[in-house]
Amino acid sequence: MGTLIYGPTAKEIRIDDRVLAHLQVVMIAKLRRAESFAFTWEKSADDGSGHTTVWVHPGIALEFAFLGSRRIPLNRAWVEDLMRTANNSSGLELVPEPDSPVR
């Protein structure tokens, strides 16, 4: 289980390493183009359930901390699906990983 560390208060968002690796690709691509976006995720029952949304902006600190040391193979179709959500008006949302070859 990895951690996305966000903002000046270093808010820690626990996310599975595989999911986090795919989010990292999408978020860095958006921020590299100086594009801000909303990011929404479902909270686990341990965290009180529900969902949370944060505004991601190039000027706000963002850190990706992985539990494992190995690089995670990426599913290109999933990256593309996540990018599509990031480019719509409601922002980046976690969508299920499609069954596609891993690259």
Image (cartoon, rainbow, N blue to C red):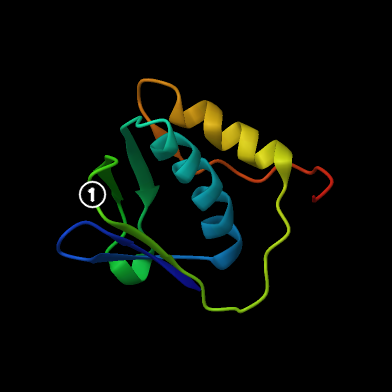
Q: Nearer the viewer, residue 18 or 50?
A: 18
Residue 62's place in the image compared with 90, above or below, is below
Q: Position of residue 15 (x, y in %)?
A: 46, 63
Residue 40's place in the image compared with 9, above or below, is above
Residue 94's place in the image compared with 16, above or below, is above
Q: Position of residue 70 (x, y in %)?
A: 67, 75
User: In which image quadrant can residue 90 be found?
Assistant: top left
User: In which image quadrant can residue 31 be found?
Assistant: top left
On the picture, is 10 further left or further right than 84?
Answer: left
Q: Position of residue 1 (x, y in %)?
A: 50, 73
Name which residue lies at 80% across and 51% down.
102
Name which residue lies at 50% across and 38% down.
29
Q: Position of residue 69 (x, y in %)?
A: 61, 79
Q: Which residue is mark 1?
A: 60
Residue 23's place in the image compared with 47, above or below, is above
Q: Nearer the viewer, residue 101 or 99?
A: 101
Q: Callout 1, which amino acid?
A: Ile
On the picture, is 102 further left or further right than 70?
Answer: right
